[in-house]
Amino acid sequence: MYVPQHFAETDIAVLHALIGTHPLGTWVSATEGGLVANHVPFLLDPSRGECGTLVAHVARANPIWQTFSTSVPSLVVFQGAQAYVSPSWYPSKRAHGKVVPTWNYVVVHAHGVPRAIDDRAWLRTHLETLVSTHEAPQPAPWRIADAPVDFIDGLLRLIVGIEIPIATLTGKWKVSQNRPEPDKLGVAAGLTARGDAPSAAMADHVRRHIPSSAEG
């Protein structure tokens, strides 16, 4: 990924946080037949490895768990907030007109060599962690124990675990850092005026890169 220095995010806590809030990763693997992409919800174990370990599962019917490369690292892409940016929001448009549209986004790329885990006890623990993580905000969280035992046992036979120790973790926060302060304020205001959640999320990222004095 091309990352100009002013868009680079290197704080591992920030990168981990994005994975936690946007856990559906695009897992790109090299296989003998070429590159294969799968969209998989990952859990991050930050305690294992310098950059953490990604943990997931795939359907046993999905050939990727038998075909991914063990010599070429996989890439997992986690996409955060993103939004189109109109040049009409820049005060510099009125000053000199030398502006063009762009697209703001935040993204994390994780590289690592995967391994498949075909172990029922491991899978059960993984699923319980996955469910408890994503059910936590629910008023009445669903639990695996709520389903019949034989039903869950049958499903466990249909999946395979995946772990990807993260060898490198790269973050790109393209959030108008390269614009002058008045243009940043204009972008934040323009995004907020749209009134939708994705634009509001990006407006928040832009504001974090505006000195408090510039905001008044």
Image: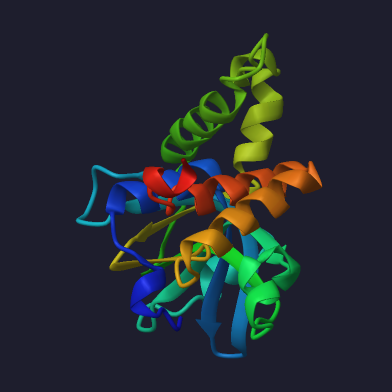
- Identify the residue at image location x=56%, y=47%: 22
- Identify the residue at image location x=46%, y=40%: 216
Q: Position of residue 125 (x, y in %)?
A: 44, 31
The residue furthest front is 95
User: Does residue 30 appear anywhere in the picture?
Assistant: yes
What colouring does the structure picture have?
rainbow
Nearer to us in this view, 107 or 197: 197
Q: On the rendered structure, is 200 left or right of 214?
A: right
Nearer to us in this view, 68 or 213: 213
Q: On the rendered structure, is 42 left or right of 40?
A: left
- Identify the residue at image location x=62%, y=45%: 201
The residue furthest top is 140
Q: Quadrant of residue 60?
A: bottom right
Q: Position of residue 151 (x, y in %)?
A: 71, 27
Q: Position of residue 57 (x, y in %)?
A: 55, 50
Q: On the rendered structure, is 181 left or right of 141?
A: left
The residue furthest left is 50
- Identify the residue at image location x=60%, y=15%: 145
Q: Position of residue 73 (x, y in %)?
A: 39, 77
Question: In the rendered picture of this protein, how many numbered marks are placed on residues?
Answer: 0
Nearer to us in this view, 180 or 26: 180
Q: Is residue 146 above or below residue 103?
A: above
Q: On the rendered structure, is 55 left or right of 190?
A: left
User: Does residue 42 appear anywhere in the picture?
Assistant: no
Q: Is residue 199 above or below residue 29?
A: above
